[in-house]
Amino acid sequence: MELPNTEAMSIEEKIWFARAIAGMIVADGRVDDSELEFLKEAISFLEDRDQVNGIMAVVRQGKTPSLEARKIDPKQSFIILKYLAELMVVDGKMSETEITFFVYAGGLLGFTSNILTKLWKTARSMLEATKPLAKISAGKNASLVRLTSLSESRCTFRNPRAMVPNMPVYIQISKSGSEEEFYDRVEGRVTGQRQEKWDEKSVSIRVDIVQRLGDQHGILQILFPDRYEVTTVNDRLTPKKSSLTGRIVNCFACGNDAVHFWSLRARSMITKQNIFGIPKYLSPSGSMDFCDFN
């Protein structure tokens, strides 16, 4: 994420930016240790340690730091706003309280509601592009959606209109992101829905899956990718560490058919994720050899 040129900012502007970062992190109401570590690093441009400690103390209490209207160089302001938009979705989610804080902070920088709406919707689109693509069929209607959440028993997605409660629907997961090829459909029921606060054209729909899942439905492949790793006969490599697995693969770019590909065995390391979802490797699991990818 691109940071503004903090060296060109005044002390007051730096404090404002640091408070805005802190506010965005706590806006969803959840603050864990990894987020605190990220925040401490993100506001390290503050030279006064008392200011840093003051912001950290407020955040530890789960409070959103107060902000005031601030006139900052337009280019710097836009970079700040873009940074906050990216920070809003860095954990793979976007809550209404995060949008509320984003609009609040952007308004104090002097941006119009139209610009702010375009920015947070762009951030939402980028986030949803990483989510599973699925076809939802209800009666004679079918539409393509991005599943905002998915488990073995439930999924959620945005829809342009409300749906009939307890209505039977069918979910088909896309194969490799294709809009033409899908896995077999699985049956579900509409069990909840709500109008989104910041988007009058979107309704968040919750569907409970009422059918036992199988490989033919494609959902298990998304939830448990390690179980469905594709390998061929006689392509295995012998690693020096038991926590690794290796195989020979073909490079589609250069045509080399003997590329050594190594990966970490599932659940071989004890990890802790930071705010970006990047794991920190702490120790091996069981009798596996430790691989330090930090």
Image (cartoon, rainbow, N blue to C red):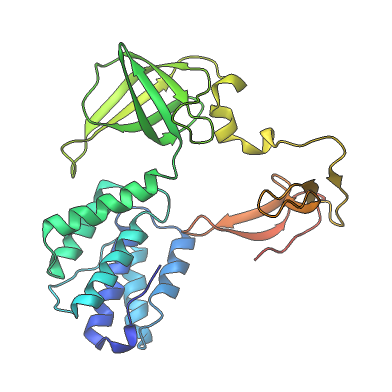
Among the 4 quarters of the image, the one containing residue 116:
bottom left
Q: Quadrant of the N terminus?
A: bottom left
Using the image, determine if residue 200 lies above or below residue 35: above
Callout count? 0
Left or right of residue 292, residue 122 in this image: left
Using the image, determine if residue 19 lies above or below residue 201: below
**Residue at x 41%, y 69% (from the top left corner):** 39
Foreground: 252 or 75?
252
Left or right of residue 279, residue 125 in this image: left
Among the 4 quarters of the image, the one containing residue 224:
top right
Residue sitting at the far front: 255
Foreground: 85 or 236?
236
Left or right of residue 34, residue 43 in this image: left
**Residue at x 73%, y 51% (from the top left corner):** 255
Using the image, determine if residue 17 lies above or below residue 162: below
Q: Is residue 214 visible?
A: no
Left or right of residue 286, residue 253 in this image: left
**Residue at x 44%, y 62% (from the top left corner):** 35
- The spot of residue 218 in percent (x, y) is 55, 26
- The spot of residue 239 in percent (x, y) is 85, 53
Using the image, determine if residue 236 lies above or below residue 59: above
**Residue at x 67%, y 53% (from the top left corner):** 270
- The spot of residue 57 in percent (x, y) is 35, 71
Q: Is residue 179 visible?
A: yes
- The spot of residue 59 in percent (x, y) is 34, 65
Q: Quadrant of the C terminus?
A: bottom right
Foreground: 126 or 38?
126
